[in-house]
Image: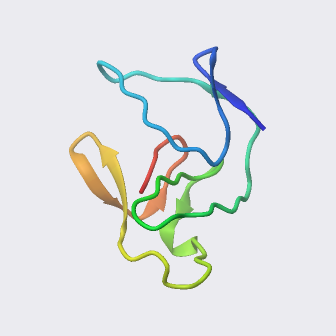
Amino acid sequence: MWGVIKGSTRYRPGVGFWLKFAGAQSVPVHGDSLLNDTVNISAGWNMIGSLTSAIPVSAIVQIPGSIVSSRYFSYGTSGYQISDSLIPQQGNW
């Protein structure tokens, strides 16, 4: 399943990326809603995101348990911050 950002840039679920703009702006994202997903992670830092709605980090299931060794982080107007939820269209690691 593929989605589209800004008319021509294609992305697919499960692949994280950063978008950089000169200033604040709204960017429409078109595609199907995702209600659940499984994401494989690797040793080190991994970029993850939410699905169609916000997900509290306490609801994330780790298999095997305790594989995540730090808190979840995001980037906001004041810089890097600890995340308590994964918010749609906002990357976390």
In-front residue for pair 46/55: 46
Q: Residue at x 47, y 44 (%)?
A: 90
Q: Furthest residue to the top?
A: 7
- What quarter of the picture does the C terminus occupy? bottom left
- What quarter of the picture does the N terminus occupy? top right
Report the number of numbered marks.
Answer: 0
Q: Position of residue 32 (x, y in %)?
A: 76, 37
Quadrant location of residue 88?
A: top right
- Compared across the picture, whether 21 is left or right of 11 comes to left
- Compared across the picture, whether 1 is left or right of 73 comes to right
Q: Residue at x 36, y 70 (%)?
A: 71
Q: Position of residue 49 (x, y in %)?
A: 53, 51
Q: Residue at x 40, y 60 (%)?
A: 45
Quadrant location of residue 28?
A: top right
> Is 59 placed above or below 79 here?
below
> Is 67 placed above or below 29 here?
below
Q: Furthest residue to the left?
A: 78
> Is 65 placed above or below 69 here?
below
Q: Position of residue 31 (x, y in %)?
A: 73, 32
Q: Furthest residue to the bottom?
A: 65
Q: Residue at x 63, y 60 (%)?
A: 39
Q: Position of residue 81 (x, y in %)?
A: 28, 55
Quadrant location of residue 4?
A: top right
Colouring rule applied to residues: rainbow
